[in-house]
Image (tube, rainbow, N blue to C red):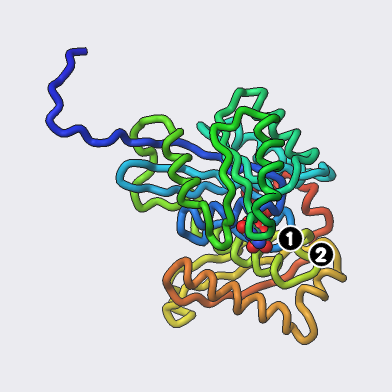
Amino acid sequence: MQSQPETHSAPPFHCGTVSIAGRPNVGKSTLMNILIDFKLSAVSPKPKTTRHKILGVLTDEDYQVAFLDTPGLPSRRHDELDRRLLSSSLEAIHEADLVVMVVEPKPPGEIEHRLIGELRGESKQAILAINKIDLVKKPELLPVMEAYARLYPFLEIVPISAVQPDGVDTLLNLIVRHLPEGEPLFAPDDVTDRPERFLAAELIREQVFNSYAQEVPYAVAVEIDTFQEQSQEHGGKDYISAILYVERDSQKAILIGRGGAMLKEIGTQARQGIEALLERPVHLELWVKVYPDWQMDRAFLLRLGY
Ligand SMILES: Nc1nc2c(ncn2[C@@H]2O[C@H](COP(=O)(O)OP(=O)(O)O)[C@@H](O)[C@H]2O)c(=O)[nH]1
Ligand SMILES: [Mg+2]
């Protein structure tokens, strides 16, 4: 190819897929939401809130990053759902141009060793983000950074706090710097490839995770039954009806609450979240059904996009 005399040298455009990996509850979804500046991925104080590989796209003048939030590596593999969570997390690592491995400011444990094994297997380019540094004192960080540096040739090791947020801009700059040059894959306004009905179901599931104690959230699957935009029957609001599947009658009773109070509360919270997402008024109806062992039903899991 003949070299052209350059009159304007625009900075190169960096573009690529970045998988956010790590054990459950380290703050992967919180980090992705803050990075893309959009409340896309469900967040709760409980591990394994995320059940899908979720794409979040961030576009700027000279870069586009396609982040993949992942369920994270579970420590156990009991049922079909666990297996799917693990395989979609591993898939996301394989697909990525770059992996951001998120850890807590603690020495590496079994899951971290396993994850690094996966990275090593493919000689993956990876950045380590040590999250939740707001919870520890500075001197505690250094030995953690050293321990990780010994385990894998991370491109960068960046201490951050996704909630404050602190260090996230630095992290983003480093991510972009290490992405290949290339053309954008998504339109500038695209935030995700997930349809609105998926995001609505996730907002409902997030409320369940934030409103109930241990057992119930893990027993719940949410399916959007009807999604009618600007329904005439509902005064021009979007009409959404969703089914919350639980495994047992006892869970159904807990989910609904005395006189339906709990379900009503979840409905109100979720509706507000969905309205913020769609920027339209919404009429939301929630139904509860018992479906024993839905976590074992491969076809059902596929239907829900797991
Ligand atoms: N103190 C603190 N908490 C955080 C931070 N990042 C996330 N969290 C909390 O950790 C919990 C799990 O976060 P989430 O993003 O759902 O983790 P994920 O399972 O890795 O996606 C939530 O309660 C978050 O608010 C952080 O930087 N500092
Ligand atoms: Mg998550």
Does residue 270 appear to the left or right of 246 in the view shown?
left
Q: Secondary structure at mark 2?
A: loop
Q: Quadrant of ligand 1?
A: bottom right
Rendered view: 274 above or below 56 = below
Q: Which residue is mark 1?
A: 46
Question: Residue 277, position in %: x, y?
Answer: 47, 66
Q: Tell me the number on the disc at residue 214.
A: 2
Rendered view: 47 above or below 144 = below
Q: Is mark 1 within 8 Å of ligand 1?
A: yes
Q: Tell me the number on the disc at residue 239.
A: none
Residue 205: quadrant of the picture: bottom right
Whether residue 117 is visible: yes
Residue 118: quadrant of the picture: top right
Rendered view: 204 above or below 79 = below
Question: Residue 119, position in %: x, y?
Answer: 64, 29
Question: Residue 35, position in %: x, y?
Answer: 49, 53
Q: Give the total number of marks visible in the rendering.
A: 2
Q: Quadrant of the N terminus?
A: top left
